[in-house]
Amino acid sequence: MGCALKCPKCGREYELGARVWRCECASPLQVLCDPFQFKPAAGVRGMWRYRASLPLVEGAEPVTLGEGGTPVVRLDVSGVRLHLKLEYLNPTGSFKDRGSSLTLTNLKASGVTEVVEDSSGNAGASISAYSAAAGVRCRVYTPASAPQGKKLQVRLYGANLIEVPGDRGEAARRALGELAGAFYASHLWSPFFPEANATIAYEFYEEVGVPDAVVAPVGSGGLILGIHLGFRRLSENGYADAAPRLYGVQSAANPVLYEALYGRRYEKAELEVVAEGVMVREPPRLEEVVESIRGSGGGVVVVGKEEVAEGLRFLAKRGLLVEPTSATVIPAVVRLKEEGLVDRGESILAPLTGSGLKALDKVESLLREAVGKP
């Protein structure tokens, strides 16, 4: 399978192993592979079961910690068959491990010896872990307000953590201004993160089939784009009849996707940030996400603080302890059912993206403030 990096804006192409993090025209790059191959490796469990479907630099060997192969838990929510994919059971506690594995695999094969990332938590911890596994030096820039548990994770993996006053945008500006020869391995920009997340679709297809809809939190958009890529490729190559509808979930504190898709201001915006994972103010792949959701016949759901707390409580009472970003999918599914956008009996895939064990203080505070003592 031949692969290259291509800019969807200007059409410029780069070799897969080129040391570029975006196109010269400042647009995010995509991976172009031909032909698509779906040949799950017999006896292999996890993301690398789909090695034949992944874009790999020549000579690359997987940098892996056992990511992927996450279980699916089935629940009935408002009469909808909800399939929760427990992505928080990945090695560092979030779905970001899939993208980190593929990214570090290709960067190591390309000769990169140091990477820089900016993150509010999960991506920084993940890139740090996989850099350690690859023997690559790592610096992570994070907002000083990021959860302490996630910052500790980064340090324990041996990365150099730089705390930045301000928000995610300020952390990104600092990271880019201090590269000093290191490669900018941002999960927001890396074309390998959506490609790795396509394996979520491949796993679900093999275990369950193709769902009627996907409901997923959207920050940078790499998760929902990757799942869409996976199901679309299966559909286009005759493995499935159709790809599912996509529903992105955002916080009322940052409804940028809602406003981009519907072309109107969200009137019930909130100031307090309760779900850091969906707080990307300027996602580089916003246009791609809008096009994918619109083309699938789906939409965007915006949830508020109290709804997130209700989602946390609902999942915890069923043995699933997740961070606030993950919990957004529960009120989103309820709302979609109430508005007639999903029907009783339909099958929905919803990834639970990050572990609540990394944000226990935040989870407890949110539950106490919004709905009383847990």
Image: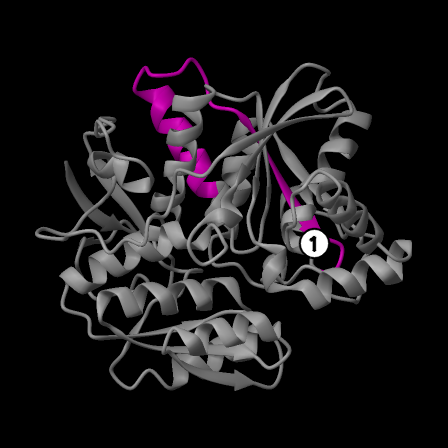
Residue lying at the far left of the rendered structure: 59
Q: In the rendered view of the protein, which quadrant contains the N terminus? A: top left
Disc 1 target residue: 255
Whole-percent x and y of residue 341?
A: 72, 24
Q: Which residues are magenta?
A: 225-253
| Rendered image quadrant of residue 363 | bottom right
300, 310: nearer the viewer:
310
Task: Indicate left or right for 89 with 79 as reference.
Answer: left
Q: Residue at x 50, y 55 (%)?
A: 93
Q: In the rendered view of the protein, which quadrant contains the C terminus? A: bottom right
Task: Indicate left or right for 318 with 38 as reference.
Answer: right
- Residue 262 position (above or below residue 210): below
Magenta stretch: includes residue 244: yes
Which amino acid lies under the numbered mark 1 shown in the image of this protein? Answer: Pro
Whole-percent x and y of residue 195?
A: 34, 44
Whole-percent x and y of residue 337?
A: 76, 26
